[in-house]
Image: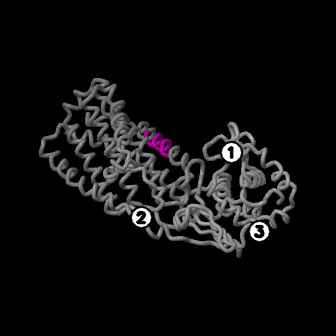
Amino acid sequence: MTGVPITRRQVVLGSVLLFLVTLMTVAGDYASWWGSWGETSATLETSTLLTYPAVAAIAAWTTSGSRRNRYQWMLDSAARQRHSVHLRVVATQAASASVGFLVVALMAGIATATQATFGTFPIIDLFTIVAGFFAASGLGVLLATLVPPALAPVCAVATVYAVGAFADTSRPSLRPLAGLIVADGRDRTYLSAATWMLGLRGMWLLAVAFLLVALAARASSKAWLPLAAACLTAVPLLLVGDAGMTVDEAAARPVCHHPRPSVTVCLSAALDHTYPSVWSALEPELDLLSGLAGQWHLAESAVADQLNASYRDGTITVPFEIVNGTDSSAHVADREALQVQFSATLLQGLCGSGGDYTGRRPVATPEDVIESWLLSELDIPLDGHGPEDPHLSSKWLDYTAMERFRAHWDSRTATQRRAWFRAHAQDVVQCQLSNVEVMTP
């Protein structure tokens, strides 16, 4: 016997499994990466939080089969050296996983290429991720030689998953470890990784894989000490290399569009690909708010120089975010969520929804009346239950004091509303309607 038997069927099943896990992870989070090369890369890295444990478990199960089925003595007496037996398992399982992963990476790359207007895909990041499959497989092989066969896959999953969960580099205390972690969890919209750091990380992971195989094969110190030394030497460079993840100034450069002579929409270069969906969502709102501004300046938060809407000399400036569900830094704008956020920033940014409380509900303000009308015209429900949903129905606010104003507002024509907006524009944006006579619009 020359090695652990691995059938073609096992290889194909392993590849299909990794393909499906990666596909579900990437496709399920498409709104956070579609159109951004940096976020596409980051999402592929994030998929390894599930695929690395799976690869380690498969390698552990395959390697422990000789002990589980009682033919380990045949491998021990074979002419082939033990480390070559383990290397074959690692190479086969890692290659199988890589094929499944790379198919999804190709699909994601093609999808992003159809939308992206900035940047390029960091190909070397794929090398880093694939090298991680070898390291995960090597860990599975090592654990299969140390623990009982039935426990080896479980221990492999627990170990790899624990490393990924513990090394949450979004926590400041663990941020220095980001250079060692494939899925570092950081937003890559405006970050650019140093090529040398990604390459070094990939080489380090391959060295770790060979070291784990040497330890599993009970190799002499002459075999594993150089590998251990190489791994330890690379660690400080990787920790320092985390500084290579820098802000790409070109990604934050503003790109402005002028869909109308009176409207300017500015986004960062990294998010410029979202402009068609952003304008599609905001255009009907501006139509309904006609007369409120002579000029509109709409700026995505990364290029906005203010946090709240403002009025100056007939120009209204409104910052906004590309939102999708609870993700406020998405790359696929959710039309309804963007409209709700825009209306809240414009009409409630300086004052917030609702005034003083009467009983259990806050008293509605004139701004609440206008926003509820605006969202109703856009067919957006006013009684959502999510934290990002509007809460403007009578279930949430007391409109008793505003009934007269609301009745007048609802009965007005588009021309009359336009004239009212023109007369009260500054009061609307600065939340000063309660200080002026607005009961007869």
Question: Residue 158 lies in what quarter of the image?
Answer: top left
Locate residue 338, reporting x and y percent: 64, 55
Q: Residue at x 26, y 33 (%)?
A: 1
Residue 304 in view in this figure:
yes
Camera-nearest label, 2 or 3 = 3
Locate residue 177, reporting x and y percent: 31, 50
- Counting residues from the N terminus, which is met first, the one under dot 1 or under dot 3? 1
Q: Residue at x 60, y 44 (%)?
A: 387
Locate residue 414, reporting x and y percent: 84, 62
- 5 is higher (above) or lower (below) than 114: above
The answer to whether residue 58 is magenta is no
Q: Main secondary structure of the magenta part?
A: helix
Q: Amino acid at mark 1?
A: His
* Numbered circle sitting on residue 422: 3
Q: Residue at x 65, y 72 (%)?
A: 312
Q: Amino acid at mark 2?
A: Val
Q: Is residue 330 left or right of residue 228?
A: right
Which span is picked out in magenta? 14-22
* Numbered circle sitting on residue 247: 2
Marks 1 and 3, how far apart at CA: 27 Å
The residue nearer to you, when weighing 122 against 416, is 416
Question: Residue 126 lies in what quarter of the image?
Answer: bottom left
Locate residue 109, reporting x and y percent: 51, 58
* Numbered circle sitting on residue 391: 1
The residue nearer to you, when weighing 16 against 421, is 421
Q: Is residue 264 left or right of residue 151?
A: right
Residue 80 in view in this figure:
no
